[in-house]
Amino acid sequence: MKLSELGGKEIVDVKRAERLGVLGQTDLEINERTGQIEALIIPSLKWFGLRKQGGEVRVPWKHIKKIGSDMIIIDIPDEEE
């Protein structure tokens, strides 16, 4: 999958069964040394428990369960909320 194909996908939390937002083209945290995606950055004004950074929520890559044609499914363990 190309980086450009990630943009515009709906992000859904599988446990809460709710939509969290839409991933934009620049909403990724990338390791400069390895080039790997480390986290998704979701613009948000309200979110439950996760680290807020200036109206954004950081979702580590390890919590992404599936990337489909229209959406990205995430599953965040209860202990990290």
Image (cartoon, rainbow, N blue to C red):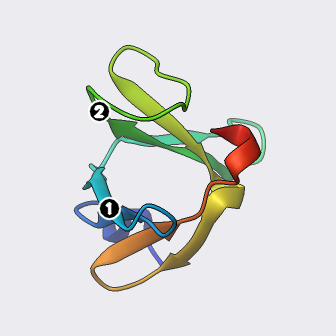
Give the CA separation, mark 2 to mark 1: 13 Å
Residue hosting label 1: 18
Task: Name the residue: 77% across, 47% down.
Answer: 34
Residue 27: x and y in percent read: 38, 42
* Three-letter amino acid code at the position of disc 2: Ser
Which of the two labelled residues, at mark 2 and mark 1, occupies the earlier sequence position? 1
Name which quarter of the figure residue 62 lies in: bottom right
Residue 21: x and y in percent read: 26, 51
Q: Secondary structure at mark 1?
A: strand
Q: Label for residue 44?
A: 2
Q: Label for residue 59?
A: none
Task: Name the residue: 28% across, 67% down.
Answer: 9
Name which quarter of the figure residue 3 lies in: bottom left
Task: Name the residue: 46% across, 17% down.
Answer: 53
Q: Residue furthest top?
A: 54
Name which quarter of the figure residue 69 lies in: bottom left
* Three-letter amino acid code at the position of disc 1: Glu
